[in-house]
Image (cartoon, rainbow, N blue to C red):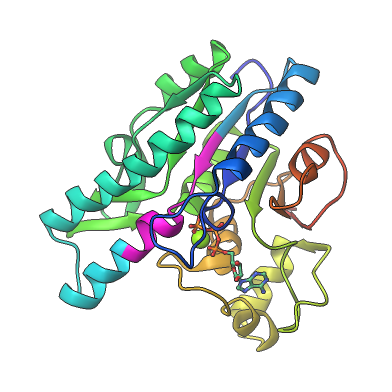
């Protein structure tokens, strides 16, 4: 792409919904986050943004129900998970359009699939064209076709994949936590970590990192861990990934504007 590579923002299911209550949304939070993004774009007209949202209290409980009851995703699971994610997507999309963002929703299950184990994205040109028109594409975690049937594609993986294919330099995960905690009492967060040191910690199975990434509510796509692991696969040197708390007003705008908030993961 000729212009600035896009910034990618994941509006996590943990912040746009209440993951403890099925089918709940946090409409005021979505609106405020939309306004913060809008303000950033107004103040930085050369920047472009791709949005991705997570499954939250819509996708995760339904996916878990199918796994628990059937052990795999059949055609019924495929169409029902798509449907519930489209319901959440409609709510998010309407709120963001109403705050003035030119949101272009893209149904993930139509543009991503797995082939021979690898993730394939079918709409790179379309997304580039949308960005050139200053539209804000909005994708979401979803269920997609794979060789053996269907599988969940997490919003986190989409973010990592798109960051690589668009050469993004900055990625933001907006969540309900202030970053990655280093202890179960949630007192200490990691301020800055390199993807290399995460890799070696994961590879050597050092106890503190893997186990601390697993507390909290159920997440079919692996919670905080996926955010890290996917970038060990797709991370490009120069990329900075920020995990921040979007329940705190102003955090996203500040972070987009260069303030150092939350956990910053550096790919070297
Ligand atoms: N070490 C850790 N530091 C911070 N949060 C952690 C840690 N380990 C687990 N978590 C959990 O990870 C959650 C955030 O990840 P989660 O996948 O639930 O959110 P999300 O990605 O925003 O949601 P979605 O997958 O629906 O988009 C936090 O709410 C917290 O409970
Ligand atoms: Mg998650």
Query: In the image, which residues are magenta?
Result: 51-61
Q: Quadrant of residue 178?
A: bottom right
| Residue 105 showing in the rendered view | yes
Q: In which quarter of the image is the N terminus?
A: top right
170 versus 174 height, above or below: above
Left-right relation of 21 to 115: right
What residue is drawn where x is 35% and y is 49%? 142
Q: Which residue reaches farthest top?
A: 133
201 versus 104 height, above or below: below
Where residue 202 appears, as percent x and y from the top left, is: 61, 77
What residue is drawn where x is 75% and y is 83%? 185
Where residue 174 appears, as percent x and y from the top left, is: 65, 50
Left-right relation of 225 to 218: right
Quadrant position of ligand 1: bottom right
Q: Quadrant of residue 243?
A: bottom right
166 versus 265 height, above or below: above
162 versus 114 height, above or below: above
| Residue 168 showing in the rendered view | no
Q: Which residue reaches farthest bottom?
A: 207
Residue 160 included in the magenta stretch of the image: no
Left-right relation of 54 to 245: left
What residue is drawn where x is 72% and y is 54%? 244
Where residue 28 appears, as percent x and y from the top left, is: 61, 42
Q: Which residue reaches farthest right?
A: 259
Where residue 195 appears, as percent x and y from the top left, is: 70, 61
What residue is drawn where x is 75% and y is 17%? 42
């Amino acid at each position: 792409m000729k212009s600035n590579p896009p910034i990618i923002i994941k509006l996590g299911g943990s912040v746009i919904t209440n993951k403890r209550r099925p089918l709940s949304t946090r409409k005021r939070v979505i609106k405020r986050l939309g306004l913060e993004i809008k303000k950033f774009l107004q103040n930085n007209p050369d920047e472009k943004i791709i949005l991705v949202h997570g499954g939250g209290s819509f996708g995760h409980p339904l996916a878990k129900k199918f796994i628990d009851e059937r052990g795999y995703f059949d055609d019924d699971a495929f169409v029902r998970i798509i449907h519930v994610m489209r319901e959440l997507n409609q709510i998010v999309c309407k709120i963001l359009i109403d705050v003035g963002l030119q949101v272009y929703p893209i149904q993930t299950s139509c543009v991503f699939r797995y082939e021979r184990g690898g993730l394939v994205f079918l709409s790179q040109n379309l997304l580039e064209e949308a960005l050139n028109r200053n539209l804000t594409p909005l994708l979401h975690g979803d269920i997609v076709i794979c060789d053996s049937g269907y599988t969940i594609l997490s919003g986190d993986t989409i973010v990592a994949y798109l960051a690589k294919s668009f050469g993004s330099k900055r990625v933001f995960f907006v969540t309900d936590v202030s970053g990655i905690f280093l202890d179960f009492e949630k007192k200490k967060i990691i301020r800055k970590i390199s993807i290399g040191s995460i890799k070696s910690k994961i590879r050597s199975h050092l106890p503190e990192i893997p186990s601390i990434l697993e507390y909290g509510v159920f997440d079919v796509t692996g919670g905080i861990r996926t955010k890290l692991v996917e970038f060990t696969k797709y991370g490009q040197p120069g990329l900075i990934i920020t995990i921040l708390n979007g329940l705190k007003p102003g955090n996203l705008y500040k972070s987009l504007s260069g303030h150092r908030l939350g956990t910053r993961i550096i790919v070297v």
